[in-house]
Amino acid sequence: MENNENLQFETVIRPKNRWFDLKIGELLKYRDLVIMFVRRNYSTLYKQTILGPAWIIITEIVTTVIYTVIFGNIADIGTDGVPTFLFYLAGNTVWAFFSKCFINTSNTFTSNAGIFGKVYFPRLVMPISVVITQLIAFFIQFVMFIGFLVYYVQKGSVRPDYASLPLFFALLIIMGVMSLGFGIITSSLTTKYRDLTVLLTFGITVWMYITPIVYPMSLVPDRWRIVFLLNPMSSVVEAFRSIFLGVGEINAAYLCYSAGVALFAFLLGAVLFNKVEKTFMDTV
Amino acid sequence: MSDVIIRIDDVYKQYRLGSIGGRTFQEDVKSLTAKLLHREDPNQKVGKEGGAVKRNERFYALSGISFDIYRGDTLGVIGQNGAGKSTLLKLLSRVTAPTSGTISYNGRISSMLEVGTGFHPELTGRENVYLNGAILGMSKSEIDRKFDEIVEFAELSQFIDTPVKRYSSGMYVKLAFSVSAHLDADILVMDEVLAVGDVRFQQKCLQKMGAVATDEGKTVLYVSHNMATIRQLCNRCVVLEKGKLKYDGDVSGGIEAYLSSQDTTQRVYNDFSNVKRRYLKYGGRAMLKSLELIGKYNNYFVNDEKLSFYLNCENHEDTEELHIHFIIKTMDDIPVATFLSPDVFSAKKGQETRFKVTLDISEIVSGNYKMDIVLVKANPVCNFIHYDTVNPALCFTKELSLGTTYTITWKTQDRGYVQGKGIEIEKV
């Protein structure tokens, strides 16, 4: 045994992961698995339903109609002159993507304990496939949104800001990374503290109301503005509406702040995830 | 010198007994503030310093395991329940990490610990094959290539586009096993409980496992309680006992080490007084009382070893011309062989008779068996009058190697339970 002491091994299982290690190479090797999970998430969601994926659009429209009636008509909150339905549809589309990513990645460990307990694959595959699944759902909703948008643009009631259209992709990336980051932070902590799952369900609702989804940023009193802008989602939602509806502001500084928060959350999440994924099976 | 493919180096795995990770956020905050204020931790378990109850005792499932596995090895891992076999497999399949020590390996490890992992009931068989394959680490093109083979092995080609929730449980495990069995890995970790489905499919599973090990030259780790399969499949054997490596070497030595690690203080002594008698026609004239193996501390018989024991018999009335029959049956009650006592015996009321019996069971092939003992009176007119039947009087495991010339699996449904020994064959 002594004469091959300097053997090189491809894989070494150690008690702990390195402090920060995304294992990109391994993730790439498992890219087929990501695709399979996305397909599974997508195709099992609406199996044995009559309307199938149409539900993605229906739920969206119903929620928006409710918002329009309650916030637009009953509460009569201003929408900066944009047709109320379109205004809420825009906010809703963005928020649905973010919140669903967040919620569905946050239970990565607890809801997949069955699979994780039996076979190894890079654990990050799970949250990543969730985000991709939600991205597909988002695009379906987005296409619908564009449909309504075209209708209103033809009517002349909305003027999109075509010049800043490329920024849209940056917004998507920020939202994706941020929700993934917060999601994996939560999922790592829920292996130890189950309290967080309870907290999350109403936390996400509270978060929605401090984000300008059902009201425009311009209605927020000046002294509260800073609180709202500390919320990294605010500038993203505002920028989204600014691009497509031509109202609101695109503030580069605040967007950079959001991107920074997203990146930080993701890195922190990766570190925590890394630490937890090795032994969570013993505690979950 | 063959090259090392897996090196297990001083591996420990610790589990905490009692409540594991069951702390709430509140408790952790309290502990943390107490620590910062240099106060006593309010959540400290009583008895950590004092003498009271230890609730968070530590338990080592593995303590200091080191060994190398070479390319092409077929390694049998045996040990009693709780010896650390499953923990070792879990570590190897990277489900959980060791507490200290490292495991290094080359190539891809596929663990066939649990079949059907990630099967989704709503998906069809086809979709599940792809999903399951991907979970186990196959790429899509790899599954494409093997798809037909997998389905054919599972014998499910006509149901492949049906959701698996409509499958019978047998079909489900067949498909799942088939995916696992077609993995293209360098190292296979297998658990014998894997052999699933009906008897015919089980044989197929075991053959497939054997084929993977012997023909494809892969490195195999094989966990089993069945010594016969270990002996048949493996070329090396490690024995774990209470988290430690007890033996590492050739298979026969390993099996011996494993058997001797079993309870060595207790002789095999079967008391029949509580055994329910079913066929007691002339109940109680003479009764079998107990059986005690001679010179053995387990019920495990290898090759030519003879089954010898003391048999105690008690008479409640005077009896004459009694015979004793020893019937060897398989566990599912198929009679294999019967030994008839050559002489008759008689005994008086209240007398206790002790026999020393030796049965030559060398021709019986590997497997688990039981022995019934029947006490009968020879009757010249009709057949026999049963005085007492003990069913079963003894359960035992037989292991018979077929000799070096044969590497075949002895399938009892084809060849029966006896390998005839009296053969003389020569060219004339």
Image (cartoon, rainbow, N blue to C red):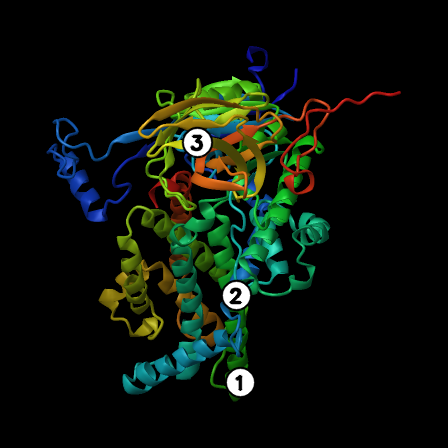
Say what amino acid the circle numbered 2 marks.
Answer: Thr
In-front residue for pair B319/A9: B319
> Please, is residue A89 above or below residue A268 in the view?
below
Q: Report how far apart the C-alphas of labels 3 and 2 lie in the structure.
A: 76 Å
Answer yes or no: are tags 2 and 1 on the same subunit.
yes
Q: Residues within 10 Å of mark 3 (few under 14, many from 20)?
A: few
Residue B9: image location, x then y, percent: 47, 22
Mark 1: which amino acid? Tyr
Chain under callout 1: A
Assign a secondary structure to mark 1. helix
Dot 1, how many residues are within 10 Å of its Cα: few (below 14), some (14-19), or many (20+)? few
Q: CA distance from mark 2 to mark 1?
A: 33 Å
Q: Which residue is denoted by mark 1 in the rendering?
A: A151
Q: Which of pointers 3 and 2 indicates the residue nearer the eye?
A: 3
Where residue B2 appears, as percent x and y from the top left, is 65, 19
Does residue B13 appear anywhere in the picture? no
Left or right relative to B414: residue A231: left
> Of helix, strand and loop, which one carries label 2?
helix
Disc with the residue nearer the chain's start (2 vs 1): 2
Q: Nearer the viewer, mark 2 or mark 1?
A: 2
Identified at 41% across, 29% down, the residue is B83
Residue corresponding to mark 2:
A44
Check chain identity for marks 3 and 1: say if they share one.
no
- Give the residue type at disc 3: Glu
State whether residue B230 appears in this view.
yes
